[in-house]
Amino acid sequence: MAPRPAPDFTFESASLARGFSVVVGVDEVGRGPLAGPVTAAAVRLDPARIPPGLNDSKALTAARRDVLFAAIMDMAEVSVAHASVEEIDELNILRASHLAMERAVTGLVTNADHALIDGNMIPRALSCSAEAVVKGDARCLSIAAASIIAKVTRDRIMVDLAQQHPGYGWDVNAGYPTPAHLRALLDFGITPHHRRSFKPVHNILYQAYSISD
């Protein structure tokens, strides 16, 4: 099987050619976990200083992501934002992930005038024009950079939370519903960082309420 092509600067170049001057890539991570925030990043790359080896975060090792994270932070304009567990439970995970994206774009030092959004939907309250790029983290360098920033940032948050709540394995599973995490939910119960609207957590809460009744 031939290797998958690396992302390139085609989408950014096309946007700049259309007259946009501040073009950013936007991606989020953390829709699937049972615990922790959803995290988004917006990145404006300098075409003259693109970190070599930049790729979709899912195609990189953790060590390589850390190296590229540092390079992107050094060479690009970056904004990171989150939506909290409370917001996820109140709004739903899709809307919360879009809220994190909107906050990331708004948080940039330079106001973006066009955003390249990973996926097939555009957040409704973005502060600039935008286009959705399906599988954008594998096709568009700015989105790939945003995917790395969001992934590394959220993983580090979950490692920190794992120190506060040992036993759930968040330092290795990042809050995703692995068998070990699901067992820990049953053994140790639900923490303030668990998403109560997600079915495995909701079911345990419901069982607990039923027993107490």
Image: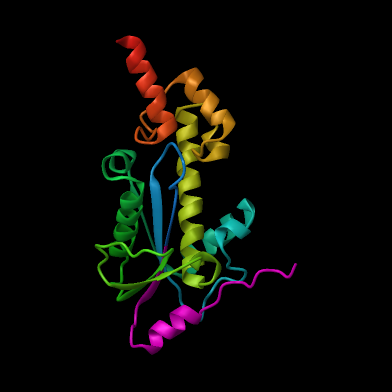
- Residue for point 39% across, 56% down: 40
**Percent x, y of residue 125:** 24, 62
Q: Nearer the viewer, residue 96 or 149?
A: 96
**Percent x, y of residue 82:** 35, 50
* Residue 5 lies in the magenta stretch: yes
**Percent x, y of residue 185:** 48, 24
Q: Nearer the viewer, residue 49 or 196?
A: 196
Image quarter of the N terminus:
bottom right
- Residue for point 31% across, 39% down: 89
Image quarter of the C terminus:
top left
Instruction: State the residue lying farthest toward the right.
Output: 1
Colour approach in the figure:
rainbow
**What is the quadrant of residue 68 in the picture?**
bottom right
Residue 190 lies left or right of residue 62; in this view the side is left
**What is the quadrant of residue 3 in the picture?**
bottom right
Residue 98 lies left or right of residue 4; in this view the side is left
Give the answer, above or below, for where 63 lies relative to 162: below
Q: Nearer the viewer, residue 41 or 90?
A: 90
- Residue for point 46% across, 77% down: 46
**Percent x, y of residue 140:** 50, 72
Kindly tell me whether residue 167 is visible in this rendering.
no
Kindly tell me whether residue 67 is visible in this rendering.
yes
Give the answer, above or below, for where 197 lies relative to 42: above
Q: Nearer the viewer, residue 150 or 209?
A: 209
Give the answer, above or below, for where 54 lies relative to 210: below
Q: Which residues are magenta?
A: 1-26
